[in-house]
Amino acid sequence: TGSIDILGIETSCDETAAAVVRRFTDGSGEILSDVVLSQLDLHSAFGGVVPELAARSHVSTLDRLVEQALAESGVPLPQIDAVAVTSGPGLIGGLMVGLMTAKAIAMAANKPFLGINHLEGHALTARLTDNVTFPYLLLLVSGGHTQIVLVKGVDDYERWGTTIDDALGEAFDKTAKLLGLGYPGGPAVEQAALSGEPKRFRLPVPMRKDPRLDFSFSGLKTAVRQMAEQQAPLSQQTIADLCLAFQTSVTASIDDRIAMALERFTERFGTESKPALVVAGGVAANKAIRTTLENRASRAGFRFIAPPLNLCTDNAAMIAWAGAERLAAGLPADQLDLAPRSRWP
Ligand code: KG4
Ligand code: ZN
């Protein structure tokens, strides 16, 4: 029956995004357009995302972005096969904006409508970029999520671990804030850590060897705060040294957790087919973390896959793609009374 073209919409956090993605019958995909409007400037003065401002901004920009995505794709709305939208988890105001818009378009154009779990979008992106086959292991590390997920198939996931307190990106952001660095904190901490003195501060490695595959970062942030208070007033060098200590410690923790996850995966599935470790989320931009994951994967006999950064962070192509994968798997479209879900594991 040929390929399918899906319009995707994403408004669950502080990115307004629309995209058109094509899925071919052989399972490969192509991004026909991918438009993302970041609200970073809107929220940076507050040191974090302000939900009300985010929702208002989605309202005022989304229709223009959808028009742009359709125009750039070269696929007019009547030829689109379905409309997919993030229906959770996320900030409820933003989700409502996306959902209402997607429903209105689907209804007016008489198209199937799909509410997508944002995490499924992140989880399936590697199949769009690298044709990865099931099963594979996903590490999702963003401002809102820190999870190890076994991806067995479309709509078929096992969550192996999650954070018991802060998300990893959130921990970077909070650490940056308490050291007087800007928002978002991740890039600022990574940059500062480059000039850090490796042996000056030592921080514990959270959850090391813990048989649960979970993460914990808030204790580390508190330890940085206490060290910073002892060292006040902070010199540029001390800030850099603390950033490096923090980054080294979270990297070691991730390495420890992922090593255990790869072991479990290997016990269950073997490594003959050279399975993949996939990383997604904004923190995947961090070079120290990336390199560590790459080394760990290769030592364990896994391929390491990090989709291009613009597809690791929030975008609508991953939502359109998840919609395409669901349709191709024979999963039903949703009803137009589908409600947004702020929490949706
Ligand atoms: O996936 P993302 O763009 O948005 C969501 O949270 O959904 O991730 C943003 C998070 C922020 O917390 C940011 O500080 C973090 O990713 N981040 C980084 C780096 N770049 C972005 N963390 C560590 N190192 C980086 N280079
Ligand atoms: Zn995300």
Image (tube, rainbow, N blue to C red):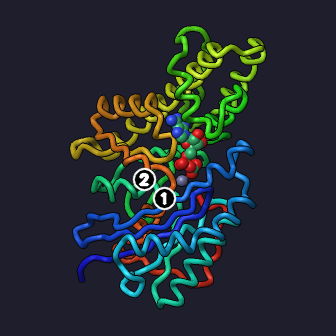
Crowding at mark 2 (Cα within 10 Å: few <14, some 14-19, many 20+): many
Decide: marks 2, 1 in contact (CB < 8 A)?
yes
Read off the residue under disc 1.
315
Crowding at mark 1 (Cα within 10 Å: few <14, some 14-19, many 20+): many
Above/below status of 290 relative to 345: above
Q: Amino acid at mark 2?
A: Leu
Read off the residue under disc 2.
311
Q: Is residue 259 visible?
A: yes
Compute the Cα span from label 2 to label 1.
6 Å
The image position of residue 320, as x and y in percent, is 43, 68
The image position of residue 148, as x and y in percent, is 49, 45
Q: Is residue 96 left or right of residue 107?
A: right
Q: Is residue 139 left or right of residue 181?
A: left
Secondary structure state at the residue bearing disc 2: helix
Above/below status of 265 relative to 341: above
Query: Front-most of 23 and 154?
Result: 23
Q: Quadrant of the N terminus?
A: bottom left
